[in-house]
Amino acid sequence: MAQEEHEPSLLIIGAGTFGTSLAVHASKAYTDASKITIVDRWSPDGPVQDQNAAAIDINRIIRTDYTSPLYCNLANEAIHFWFWNMEVQGHFHKAGWTVFDGPEQNRHFRDGVHKTFGNRGSNVVKDVHADELIKDHEILKGLDGEKLGKRGISTPRRGWVNAAKATKAYLRVAESQGAKRVTGEVEEILFRDDGTGLEGARLQDGTILKADKVVLAAGAWTSSLLSPLEDILKIADKDRIERQVTAVGRLSAYYDLSEEEANHLMETKLPIVVIGGEVDIIPPYYHIPTLKVNDLKTEFTNTTTTAAGRRISAPSKKNQMQVPARLIQQSERVIKNSIPEWTKTRSPDRWRMCYDAVTPTEDWVLSRHPDDRLKNLYIAVGGSFHSYKFMPNAGKYLLNVLYGKSNGEEKDRAWKWKNEVELEERGAKEFGESPRNRTRLDLNDFEEEKARL
């Protein structure tokens, strides 16, 4: 970013992927980083199990395999950071990444990744056969190669990162430059008295944070914070944030392993295994002896009603570990279908509901709010369950948006606040042409019986 004569004070609401990235890039660009404040409801030193955010977990997958040239290029730009940057050393673990077509035999992702890397001139992706992987790894014993889709692709220089620790470490870079971090929950976003935009935000404890520009990077909580402003301004349904993004939940199952079990999986080099449209299986590491399985098939929303009577999507206010029993049962069927023999003798030691903000096209939204009455409000949202890997570089592009500078035609088009026609475009960035589950049930549909695990 070129140096500006006037450095506007920034209030960043949300210290997740986009908020943390912006705080770091802005703090390095500013001559006076004390003008930057980032606020989040959770302390970075608090227990992970109490923090519902997508950017706070024991692991997040880091890979560059996309059918989209845009996100493939961005991921390749970011992966060098995870490998070499001292700020996050010790948090990234190279395990390799293998993805299979899945039971629907959807090869669009596999073919698309080959094409994208081929066009880059560096195709490091190799084809693998399902039966070979099953033979090499006992945890997959009993899984029919047909279930995996027989064929898949593998890339060795991929892995996962301890997201909770990496996010905390990266945010410290901004703090070391002079940016201020505040722990507190935003109760209300405030208008200026003269009606020329936003003044800042009021926290639940009454603290008021003011800034020239406000950046809402609140992930799945975006609608719950912005909808009250939209109600006051009587913004039409088609122009509201809920059309741009939906708060969606997924389940993760955690299996605690003995030292012997964890060592065996590492010695046999179990990679991250993705069964298209079904599950992610993430292997352990020495100091994190946990096998994590993400259910990709069971997605849900949590619908709430605002004071004005609007129905919006937002994360449940319950503890993320408090999972309805019926939801667990549905997810268990998916996992047992993917790991049939291993799960006969053991169940997850805990479950977690993880929320993220999903856009219709699965692109990000990095944009100034289109309503002139909110002219100093900027939106940074839309991780869509595939964007944590971009924490190192997303902020530099968001900083350009704050200064009204183009990121180039391709990026500007992908990350804009979209109109009705653009929102109807097919979105499948996470796994190429493999569509996300559109028939999501609501969390209230599973609430008859609850289990705390």
Image (tube, rainbow, N blue to C red):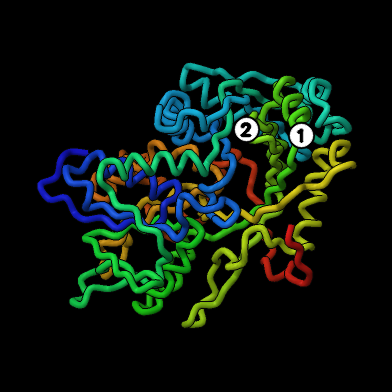
Name, please, the residue furthest toward the left. 5
User: What residue is shown with label 1?
Assistant: 258
* Marker disc for residue 287: 2
| Residue depicted at x 67% and y 66% | 442
Q: Nearer the viewer, residue 58 or 135?
A: 58
From the image, which quarter does the N terminus lie in?
top left
Q: Is residue 75 visible?
A: yes
Q: Is residue 418 visible?
A: no
From the image, which quarter does the C terminus lie in?
bottom right
Q: Nearer the viewer, residue 49 or 212?
A: 49
**Residue 229 point in image, percent of width and height:** 37, 73
Using a 10 Å C-alpha cutoff, classify the residue at mark 2 as few (fewer than 14 neighbours), some (14 to 19) or many (20 or more): few
Q: Amino acid at mark 2?
A: His
Q: Amino acid at mark 1?
A: Ser
Image quarter for residue 12?
bottom left
Image quarter for residue 76?
top left
